[in-house]
Image (tube, grey):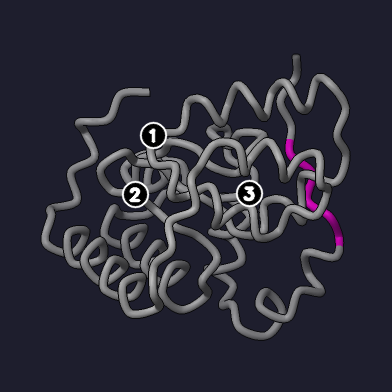
Amino acid sequence: MAKYRMVRTDFWKNPIVSEMMTPEDKYFYLYLLTNPHTTQIGIYRITKKQMAFDLGYSIERVHSLVERFIEHHNLIRYNLETRELAIKDWGKYNLRKGGKPVMDRIFSELKEINDTSLIPFVLESIYKQEIRSIYESFYEPVRMSDKEMKDRNEYVTSLDTDKKFDDTSFVS
């Protein structure tokens, strides 16, 4: 089965893209949406080293862009330990239709996710109920206060900042 990703033309009408992103941000975001590691579910494994290689950037530059997309744009989450990246608006761009082959693919890819806390982040932009219910079946909602969530995000960010940019331990 051929793997492809479509970019809808309304991507360019998104106020975040058209008003808040630099040209480099737009390039990076398109890469995140269309690179060969993407999956049907919007959560996939990729190292910063691989991103740097694909884009022709330094690992430090990719680290900076990832942080910008987490902190400033709030469009992605990245788990440094599992090397999993989640795209917030994945459902808006890629999950408008269902059907058995799509549903089976979503189910099998969700089974492979190590950090299930990324699932609700992607789920926010999925409007089709039959697809939403599959995502919902793969995580137990944990009720965190805003302060607990902020503390968790700061902790993950501090772990990421404290580590060197060595992504060689990941094998795809």
Q: Return the x and y of residue 126 as percentages of the image width and height.
A: 74, 53
Label 1 near label 3: C-beta < 8 Å? no
Q: Give 93 or 126, whichever is nearer the viewer.
A: 126
The residues colored magenta run 5-9
In the picture, measured across the screen, residue 137 lies left or right of residue 151, that is right
Identified by mark 2, the residue type is: Asn
Identified by mark 1, the residue type is: Asn
In the picture, measured across the screen, residue 129 lies left or right of residue 132, that is right
Disc 3 crowd, CA 10 A, few/some/many (<14, 14-19, 20+)? many
In the picture, measured across the screen, residue 62 lies left or right of residue 112, that is left
Local SS, label 1: loop
Check disc 3 and report the residue beneath it.
33
- Residue drawn 58% across the image and 27% down it: 109
Q: Nearer the viewer, mark 3 or mark 2?
A: 2
Task: Choose top left, top right, bottom left or bottom right for residue 38.
Answer: top right
Task: Choose top left, top right, bottom left or bottom right for residue 144.
Answer: bottom left
Q: Is residue 12 magenta?
A: no
How far apart marks 3 and 2 lie (CA) works out to 17 Å
Label 2 near label 3: C-beta < 8 Å? no
Check disc 1 and report the residue beneath it.
114
Identified by mark 3, the residue type is: Leu
How far apart marks 3 and 1 lie (CA) works out to 20 Å
Q: Is residue 6 magenta?
A: yes
Local SS, label 3: helix
Q: Earlier in the sequence, mark 3 or mark 2?
A: 3
Q: Return the x and y of residue 19 as percentages of the image width and height.
A: 68, 85
Local SS, label 2: strand
Q: Earlier in the sequence, mark 2 or mark 1?
A: 2
- Residue drawn 34% across the image and 41% down it: 83
Label 1 near label 2: C-beta < 8 Å? yes
Q: Give 1 or 134, whichever is nearer the viewer.
A: 134
